[in-house]
Image: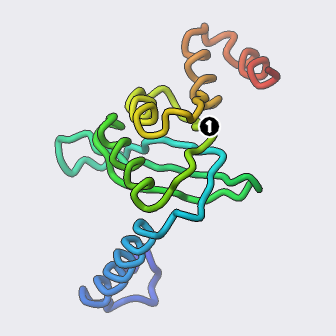
Amino acid sequence: MSAILGDGVKGLSAANSVRPKKSWEEEYQKWRSRDLSEKEYVYFWVDGIYFNVRLDDERTCILVIMGADKHGNKELVAVDDGFRESKQSWKEILLELKKRGLKVPPKRAIGDGALGFWAALDEVFPTTKRQRCWVHKTATILDKLPKSIQSKSTSMIHDM
């Protein structure tokens, strides 16, 4: 622990390190069950985040939804684990948001090309419009071009 927290924590016992974890877990559970009935999001930004830590053979990831309201206020809406950004994993998260009171679907969702989210969105919030994330779209375009023109093409894509 001293490598992470500094020399002032020498002698930190296992019990002392477990106590904050328990508190953080309680805070997370309270946050992920909060009431969303007063929330109305204009945008959802979604992505699955993969880590290099392989605790098992499964392809698990963290699914994240950021939201923005009509005033431009952004907030973390959902964070949960999922399996390969599958339709079922995303659907469970979206249905949980509805269960917690989210009545008005977001106007637009922005994400990468992972098909699982789009399929789940069609079922749970069918009126939400889709938009491909420009970062992912740009990477896809550049991947198809020769390396010699990628630098110039990046600025042209940004100009669009």
- Which three-letter amino acid code belongs to the residue tagged 1? Arg
Q: Is residue 27 left or right of residue 130?
A: left
Which residue is painted at 66% across and 10% down in the image?
Answer: 148
Q: Which residue is mark 1?
A: 108
**Residue nearest the viewer, comparing 69 with 133:** 69
In percent of width and height, residue 90 lies at: 37, 42
Q: Secondary structure at mark 1?
A: strand
In percent of width and height, residue 150 lies at: 67, 15
The quarter of the image holding the N terminus is bottom left
Which residue is painted at 25% across and 47% down in the image?
Answer: 54
**Residue nearest the viewer, comparing 153 with 44:** 44
Which residue is painted at 45% across and 85% down in the image?
Answer: 7
Few, some or many residues within 10 Å of mark 1 (<14, 14–19, 20+): some
Above-or-below relation of 6 to 98: below
Q: Is residue 6 left or right of residue 14?
A: right
Which residue is painted at 32% across and 43% down in the image?
Answer: 89
The quarter of the image holding the C terminus is top right
Q: Is residue 97 left or right of residue 85?
A: right
Above-or-below relation of 3 to 111: below
Task: Kindly indicate the quadrant of the structure image that contains residue 86.
Answer: top left
